[in-house]
């Protein structure tokens, strides 16, 4: 496994002890009421406050793709596409949120968890194009995919597309709705892919320890804290901060703000020096020093997405 895949988000023993000491000093030492526990047979599965907010925004503007989180990486070397699909299906199975749909029941969002077996990775074959044209086409397809909206009532709210330029060069695009993921979650996704893909690609059974709890367990814990009044202090703090007459932010603009936000932005082009142009141009598969995932050396690139689509 690559060096990056050995990195852990867990605290060291020394940092755990320090954190425990600081919590105790603030009167926040661990207690059963503060512990997230797995769902029991009679427990509900509420949305977190963040999920409720994103669901409301989706009801307000259905089909808005601005909460799609996407990434794109170039893959150099032989790619075992069935093994990659198998690894992603296993990640979807492990993480309940990636199998979750959000139904509208009389104006109330209801969380429904589905299965992972029906998920399939999409495939685009660009092998007939010259390599430079294939790269441009792959990135254009990825941009189009990023703008394709999710239906929150249908799971999974995650998709992936492999784009084959030739046997030694692929593009991998992934997209997930923000209601079931965030930047930290994406880093966990690629870290687990780092561990599972090499196993499946060599015919082994990829194994990761089962998760101690799911995101819905956190959401229920969050709601329970609210019901016990443990967030009252935080709420009062922000009420005090925002009390009174707030200053008006009067920014200069060329046009009157439309009644409905369009999200149609623009861009400003400028020339950069030849040094920068040479450093970032091309992404040719034979060039050294560019960010690739090399299939012969673990999954270092998947520790973080390598290519932002802008």
Image (tube, grey):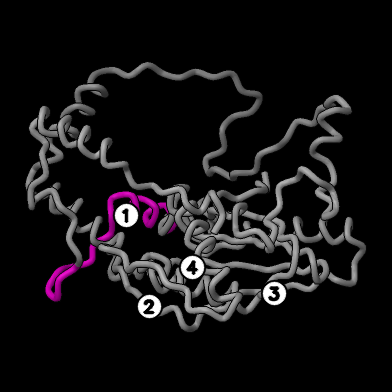
Residue at position x 60%, y 53% from top?
A: 300
Label 4: few (<14), some (14–19) or many (≥20) C-alpha neighbours in 10 Å = some
Q: Earlier in the sequence, mark 1 or mark 2?
A: 1
Structural distance between the alpha carbons of marks 4 and 3: 21 Å
Q: Which residues are magenta?
A: 39-59
Task: Look at mark 3 in the image and give the residue it sits on.
Answer: 123
Q: Earlier in the sequence, mark 4 or mark 2?
A: 2
Structural distance between the alpha carbons of marks 3 and 2: 23 Å
Task: Look at mark 2 in the image and give the residue it sits on.
Answer: 114
Residues at marks 3 and 2 touching, judged by CB atoms closer than 8 Å:
no
Q: Earlier in the sequence, mark 1 or mark 3?
A: 1
Task: Look at mark 1 in the image and give the residue it sits on.
Answer: 52
Residue at position x 24%, y 39% from top?
A: 16
Structural distance between the alpha carbons of marks 4 and 2: 14 Å
Furthest toward the right, the residue is 130
Which quadrant, please, contains the N terminus?
A: bottom right
User: Looking at the image, how many numbered discs can be counted on the residues?
Assistant: 4
Instruction: Give the structural element (helix, strand or loop) at label 3.
Output: strand
Q: Position of residue 84 (x, y in %)?
A: 60, 72
Q: Position of residue 225 (x, y in %)?
A: 13, 48
Task: Look at mark 4 in the image and give the residue it sits on.
Answer: 151
């Amino acid at each position: 496994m690559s060096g990056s895949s050995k990195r852990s988000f867990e605290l060291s023993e020394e940092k755990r002890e320090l954190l425990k000491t600081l919590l105790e000093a603030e009167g926040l030492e661990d207690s059963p009421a503060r512990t997230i526990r797995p769902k029991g047979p009679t427990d509900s599965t509420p949305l977190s406050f963040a999920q409720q907010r994103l669901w409301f925004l989706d009801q307000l503007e259905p089909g808005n793709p601005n909460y799609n989180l996407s990434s794109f990486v170039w893959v150099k070397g032989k790619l075992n596409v069935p093994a990659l699909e198998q690894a992603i299906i296993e990640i979807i199975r492990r993480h309940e949120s990636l199998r979750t749909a959000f139904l509208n029941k009389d104006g109330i969002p209801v969380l429904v968890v589905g299965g992972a077996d029906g998920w399939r990775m999409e495939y685009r074959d660009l092998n007939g194009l010259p390599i430079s044209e294939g790269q441009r086409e792959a990135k254009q397809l990825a941009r189009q995919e990023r703008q394709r909206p999710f239906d929150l009532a249908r799971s999974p709210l995650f998709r992936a597309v492999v784009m084959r330029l030739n046997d030694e060069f692929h593009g991998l695009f992934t997209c997930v709705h923000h209601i079931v993921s965030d930047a930290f979650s994406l880093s966990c996704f690629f870290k687990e892919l780092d561990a599972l893909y090499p196993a499946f690609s060599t015919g082994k059974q990829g194994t990761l320890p089962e998760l101690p709890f799911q995101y819905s367990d956190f959401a229920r814990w969050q709601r329970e804290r609210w019901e016990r009044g443990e967030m009252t202090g935080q709420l009062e703090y922000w009420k005090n901060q925002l009390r009174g007459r707030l200053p008006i932010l009067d920014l200069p603009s060329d046009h009157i703000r439309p009644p409905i936000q369009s999200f149609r932005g623009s861009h400003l082009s400028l020339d950069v020096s030849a040094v920068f142009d040479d450093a970032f141009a091309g992404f040719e598969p034979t060039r050294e020093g560019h960010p690739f995932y090399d299939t012969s050396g673990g999954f270092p690139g998947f520790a973080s997405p390598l290519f932002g689509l802008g």
